[in-house]
Image: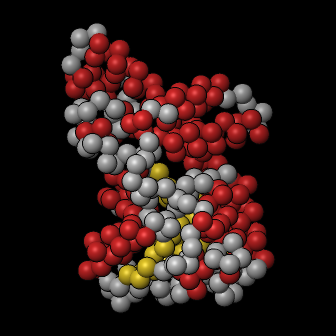
Amino acid sequence: MSGDYGFIGLGAMGYAMAGMVRKSLPQETTLYIYDVYAPSCERFISESGSYGPIVSVRSAKECATKTKTIISIVPTGANVREVYLDTERGVMAAPMDSQRLILECSTIESEVAREVAKELAQAERGTYIDTPVSGGVPAAEARTLSFLIGRAWNEEDDMSVRAQQCMEMMGQKKKFFWCGNLGAGLAAKISNNYISCSVLLIIAEAMAVGVRSGIDPKLLQAVIHNSTGQSFMGDHVNPVPGVVAHAPSSNNWKLGFKTQMMIKDISLGVEAAKRVGIEPRMASTAVEIWKEAAADPRCIDRDGSSVWLHINDISET
């Protein structure tokens, strides 16, 4: 683990992932962090500073200037372009370093990942690898994330070895899937999310049917868990409060994934399906349901802490 590390994006997932990185790094190694919402950085330093030095920086450019390895996770492809390609505040504005390793963990379009990677490589700003993650905040906090990697594993390839060492700070090696080509990790993640974003709606409806039919919700969950309806989402994201102790519904939704982001993720699946000639009937319906849910006042973010603003909207002062 040579050189200092940078982490960009301290939303719920990024916050938990960055915490594991800080705990895993040698104590003398500095972790540079950047998020457009400064209070997230301040809270992170307060909670994780005892594990080693943490420095909050004011731009992705500054983060890249000071580090050999960058990990990022932000909401959208537009945010990724800003973080890396902005010529004033992005990684593109940092000094040239062809040995800079970039692990980009966001769930975005494969095409955007390939575009960003190409421009960074041509400008000698580093090697960009799409490494989307799966498992949610609980897996991030338990260091058991899955990584879907847009690169072929090669033990002779220094970047692959460094990437694996970095990912081992946040996930389990047995759950690292080397998908072969740039953008392939994202294609795998989008396919997975096509299922998870849709099936969660089915679980909600099924639980409602059973409970309104007089079945105790915990008993119903036990039946489903031990029957053909069993799924990861049912076991870990059951929407009925008090049924699954570690589910967001049982924790005042503190561990939850924003409803608005569900629309983004399932829409990526719809777009990907259409590009390869598949009519996404299930996901198209799911998108409309998630849009209805997102319009509910209970799903509107009120504190701004998880909203990633555009870099150009953030002043230097």
Residue 120: image quadrant is bottom right
**97 left or right of 173?**
right
- At x 69% / y 72%, what residue is drawn? 86
Residue 237: image quadrant is top left
Whether residue 268 is visible here, answered yes or no, is yes
Taking depth in this image into account, of 215 and 159 the one nearest to the observer is: 215
Q: How is the image coloured?
A: secondary structure
**16 left or right of 149?**
left
Q: Of all residues shown, which one is farthest toward the top?
A: 213
Whether residue 151 is visible here, answered yes or no, is no
Q: Is residue 48 above or below residue 213?
A: below
Give the x, y percent position of residue 69: 54, 79
- At x 58% / y 86%, what residue is drawn? 65
Give the x, y percent position of residue 275: 77, 39
Q: Is residue 235 above or below residue 209?
A: below
Give the x, y percent position of residue 118: 76, 69
Taking depth in this image into account, of 299 and 253 the one nearest to the observer is: 299
- At x 52% / y 78%, what residue is drawn? 317
- At x 27% / y 42%, what residue is drawn? 252
**272 left or right of 102?**
right
Q: Is residue 209 above or below residue 14?
A: above
Give the x, y percent position of residue 267: 63, 39
Taking depth in this image into account, of 42 and 243 the one nearest to the observer is: 42
Q: Is residue 67 above or below residue 261?
A: below
Residue 251: image quadrant is top left
